[in-house]
Image: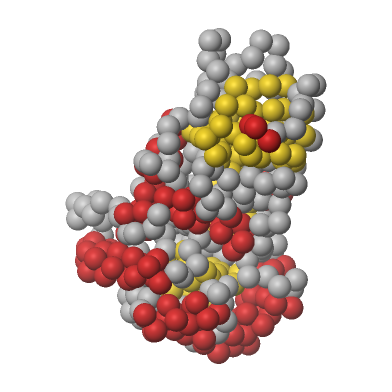
Amino acid sequence: MTTRYDNAVLVDGTGAAPVSDAVLVVDDGLITYAGATAEAPRTPDATRVDLGGRTLLPGFFDCHAHLSMTPERPLISGLTTDPTVGTFEIAERLRATLHAGVTSLRDLGGTPSGYRTVLERGLIEGPRLQVAVKVISHTGGHADCSLPGGLDAAPHLGELADTPDEARIAARRMLRAGADVVKLCATGGMGSPHDDPDDEGLTSEEMRAVVEEAARHRGRPVAVHAQGTAGIRNALRAGVTSIEHGYGITDELCDLALEQSTFLVPTLSTVFAPLDPATMPAYHYQKKSRWSGISKENIAHAISRGVRIALGTDAGVVPHARNLLELSHLVELGMASLDAIRAGTLDAARLLGVDERLGSLETGKTADFVVVDGDPVRDIGILGRPESVVLVAQAGQVRKNTANTRGNPLFREGNSQW
């Protein structure tokens, strides 16, 4: 079936200027045309949908999320949570995230590969999913969730390794478990009580062993939690695919990232999150307070240097289904709106290795797209409000339509798609 979306402002995700009077034609889940109405092909048999001048964009990506986590639930609660209830909670987070405009998501620890399978089979609705399964850390590192008595508070989240050989074997276990990407810890972190962002995690040698192992398995990427400067340097020297967070990135490390075409996923949603000592452990509040200004300054500099940026939020540490607020934070630190949109679409697709079929509205690509009320190029904050996202589609199939009422431009009598 062919569907023609008329009367749209097209922002195609490539960074090109918007097309003010545009058409999108979708046939069998693929884009057959995206561009100016004046140049559009004739489609006399298509189902026509008038978008009423709204903005049409590619489906967005979140390259760093944790579906098994929520900000209000400490890790220890996983020991007492009914796993069946937890499964349905994750399914609901997936649906809400999709409805917020995120059609593809990478979970970087805590979510098994079975969720990817049920999404592919259409058993639940949610973003297209890539998973790391668990996070590889050294003993006492950021992903070591051991309690004082020795009990592991989050066995679904952390995988420990303390030598290059152990790191290599841990990577093999993750790949055996269905990981699309291997996640490592090169530094400590904010939310863990026993380490600090300036503490080094896995060594360059340990990370290099994982990079080599991942390359042997269809070139799997390696994403690295790296906040402090020393750990970022170690990870870049190991040849990893992406630096997650990157708060201590320096001019020297920008040079190295640019030389190696390494992506930075800055997760600014955690940096801009409100600080409340009444609701945060003291160690967490102190670290976040100390790093907030430093992080903004360093990420702003990385943006100005042209380091490759892909959108990621750390959803789970911050609330789910508010993912596109990250775009506003990128713009606040100096990124142009069209570049921020590209960071959340085509550049994110490049990081995830799916840019040949996703990430932009171009002929031949899969028809993942969103429609929003308003002009996000002028006011990027529109995209951070899920209620402004009035339509979400994956492979041409509408997953959300909040404009399905008579008299609304998105409604057509007898149009079974709605």
> Between residues 363 and 81, which one lies in front from this camera angle?
363
**Left or right of 244 in this view: 121:** right
**Residue 284's x, y, as percent?**
28, 63
Taking the spot 55% from the left edge, 89% from the top edge, the residue there is 205
**Left or right of 111 in this view: 322:** left
User: Eyeballing the image, is 294 above or below 377?
Assistant: below
**Residue 14's x, y, as percent?**
57, 53
Quadrant containing the N terminus is top right
Q: Which colour scheme is used?
A: secondary structure
> Between residues 217 and 18, which one lies in front from this camera angle?
18
> Between residues 289 and 346, which one lies in front from this camera angle?
346
Taking the spot 43% from the left edge, 36% from the top edge, the residue there is 375
Residue sitting at the far front: 38
Residue sitting at the far left: 278
**Residue 194's x, y, as percent?**
34, 74
Quadrant containing the C terminus is top right
Q: Can residue 73 be seen in this view?
A: no
Picture quadrant of residue 232 = bottom left
